[in-house]
Amino acid sequence: MDWQHYIGEQFHASVNNLLNAIEPLSPALAIAGDTMANALLNDQRLFCAGLGTAQLLASRFSTTLLNRFQHDRPSLPVFNLTGDAILLNAIITDHGINDTIAKPLHSLGQQNDMVVLFACDPGINGLLQAIQAAHDRDMSVILIGTHQHQECRSLLQSSDMDIYIDADHPARALELLLFCSHSLCDLIEKKLFFGESA
């Protein structure tokens, strides 16, 4: 096999995947970024979470908003609920994986806070309970996930948002999810600190 040609094909597949996502994702990302920025302006907090591979996305999202995306600026109140391995292990040991996001949300979430759930792995339990926990605390949900999470979508309410990733290959889906995360961070940073409309 010509490995150089194979790698080139992967680049093309990734670029085509991004190009095909422009029209379906751009409106949803613009609305979600504006909604999160307005929540932060109103002294509300953002929580984020992901299980399995999506833990990486939640960690990147929270770190970027707490620290910086492109510019040095004040930190934002964004909390990663699935970033503490000791806490996750304790909850899984005592209560099972279904409570890994729901339990801290019940404890920390307050009315009008928001939770951003990243979902990219099929068969990962805990997102349904997380959505229910957010609703129990009168929090809105932004679900950023693939076609494999229809059951989660069925729980979303009118105040929630669904950013739907359409990609058949797991690597392409992960790339789109990361791109969405970066786009949201960029929009939030620009609106809050540089007077630009999201």
Image: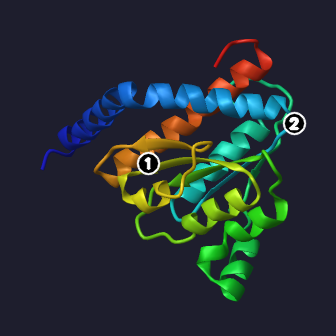
- Amino acid, disc 1: Leu
Question: Which residue: 37% across, 58% down?
Answer: 148
| Relative vertical location of residue 135 with respect to residue 11 in this rendering, above or below | below
**Image position, residue 134 (x, y; %):** 69, 58
- Nearest the camera: 137 or 142? 137
**Residue 37 appears at what percent x and percent y?**
73, 29
Q: Residue at x 69, y 67 (%)?
A: 102
Residue 32 screen position, x and y as percent:
60, 33
Frontmost of labels 2 and 1 is 2
Number of callouts: 2
Within 10 Å of disc 2 (Cα), the crowding (few <14, some 14-19, many 20+) is few
Quarter-of-image position of residue 19: top left
Which amino acid type is marked by label 2?
Answer: Asp
The local crowd at label 1, few if under 14, some if 14 to 19, many if 20 or more residues have their Cα within 10 Å, is many
> Is residue 30 toward the left or the right of residue 6 in the image?
right
Mark 1, residue position: 174
Q: Position of residue 93 (x, y in %)?
A: 68, 86
- Marks 2/1: CA–CA distance: 31 Å
Q: Is residue 36 above or below residue 111?
A: above
Picture residue at 63% right of the left edge, 63% below the top = 132
Q: Hey, which quadrant is residue 25 in on the image?
A: top left
Q: Residue furthest front?
A: 158
Q: Are marks 2 and 1 in contact (CB under 8 Å)?
A: no
Furthest-bottom residue in view? 94
- Mark 1 secondary-structure assignment: helix
Question: Which residue bears the numbered disc 2?
Answer: 43
Label whose residue precedes the other's in the sequence (2 or 1)? 2
Residue at 71%, 79% in the rendered image: 91
* Secondary-structure class at tag 2: loop
Left or right? Give the position of 183 relative to 153: right
